[in-house]
Image (cartoon, helix red, strand yellow):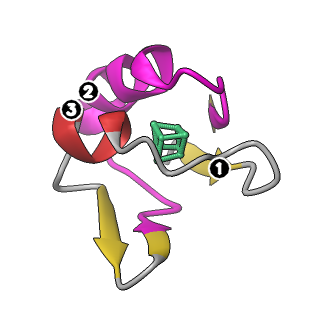
Amino acid sequence: MPKVKVDMNLCEFHGQCVFVAPKHFRFVGDDLQYDELISDEDRQLVEKAAKACPQLAIKVSD
Ligand code: SF4
């Protein structure tokens, strides 16, 4: 299962990830929460969110 990691030291809460992949990234109060494990089918969408992140804070790995 692909793993997702957001470097919260880089994240500036721009929200593009939430916009691109709301199923996997969400704001809860002032906090960004996200799914750390995703299905293979969702990988492409989460990689699209990672590309959209202006801070390049999102990493997807195997
Ligand atoms: S797009 Fe990047 S900087 Fe913006 S909230 Fe998501 S992880 Fe954080």
Left/right of residue 57 with respect to residue 34 in the rendered view: right
Q: Position of residue 19 (x, y in %)?
A: 19, 39
Q: Which residue is mark 3?
A: 20
- Up the image or down, 14 lies above or below 27; here it is above
- Is label 1's Cβ within 8 Å of ligand 1? yes
Q: Quadrant of residue 21?
A: top left
Q: Is residue 23 left or right of residue 51?
A: left
Q: Nearer the viewer, residue 58 or 16?
A: 16
Q: Residue 51: horizontal and vertical position, in percent?
A: 47, 14
Residue that mark 2 sits on = 45
Residue 42, quarter of the rendered image: top left
Residue depicted at 65% across the width and 46% down the height = 11
Amino acid found under the numbered disc labelled 3: Val
Q: Which residue is mark 1?
A: 6
In the displayed image of the protein, which residue is found farthest to the bottom? 29
Which tag, 2 or 3, sits closer to the chain's start? 3
Q: Residue at x 30, y 64 (%)?
A: 26
